[in-house]
Image: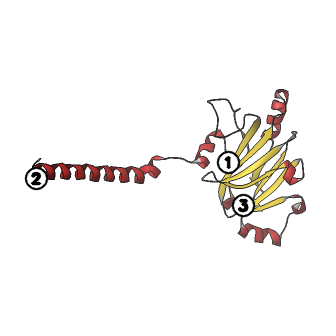
Amino acid sequence: MTLSTRFSFIAGTLAVFCLAAVIHILVVLTIPLNVKHGAYDDVQRYGPDRQFNVLPDVKPGAEPLPGLDPAMKHAICRFQLANGTVFFDAELPVPFWSIGIFNEAGEAVYSLNNRTAGADRLSMLLITPEQLSILRENPPENLEDLIVIETKETSGIALLRAYIPHPTRANAIEAAMSQATCDILG
């Protein structure tokens, strides 16, 4: 192998590696531009903001959202705290319910269930630190009955889950979930 052939081979190999590196960097940098939506955007298709929207049943290959339990009924609510504190209220006729609060990226911020709440009724207020200072000046009459959760997140998702003990109870549970409240405290 002559010196010029070796030089051509090394130069060609180096050129291929440089081109591959440039393409790799461009692909990595354009990933955020190609990912058009996150968890917060995904739930918008199930109904309006500031109300619980009951999700379709979880079936293999047709999950409304990833990671949902098929033994549960689910309702989801998008909220924004910029418009005021958000009040969650639900009376679910089940042996187990839970609510998870997630930020816009889908990361868990808070979780509560009927056993840790010590009550069968969900009655919770989600509030920013600024709103809490205002609330302390003029508290609502039922403040002692509410679970008050302070967060710095200004928008997110609430996922309400209720265990279905028997298929015959599914309709009653769905009706109760559709009556659940996720709205500005008024």
Residue ID at (63%, 40%): 66
Residue 15 is labelled as none
Residue 141 shows in the view: no
Please tell me whether mark 3 sits on a helix, a strand or a loop: loop
Give x and y (percent) for residue 64.
Answer: 64, 36
Residues at marks 3 and 1 touching, judged by CB atoms closer than 8 Å: no
Please name the residue that numbered disc 3 is placed on. 84
Please name the residue that numbered disc 1 is placed on. 49
Instruction: Residue 132: name its quadrant.
Output: bottom right
Q: Is residue 123 above or below residue 151?
A: above
Mark 2 Cα within 10 Å, few/some/many (few <14, many 20+)?
Answer: few
Spatial separation of the CA atoms under disc 1 and disc 2: 70 Å
Frontmost residue, 169 versus 134: 169
Please name the residue that numbered disc 2 is placed on. 3
- Tell me the kind of residue under disc 1: Asp
Residue ID at (31%, 49%): 20
Left or right: residue 71 versus residue 29 is right
Q: Is residue 25 above or below residue 53?
A: below
- For the C terminus, the image quarter is bottom right
Instruction: Residue 164: name its quadrant.
Output: top right
Q: Given this view, does label 2 or label 3 mark the residue nearer the observer?
A: 2
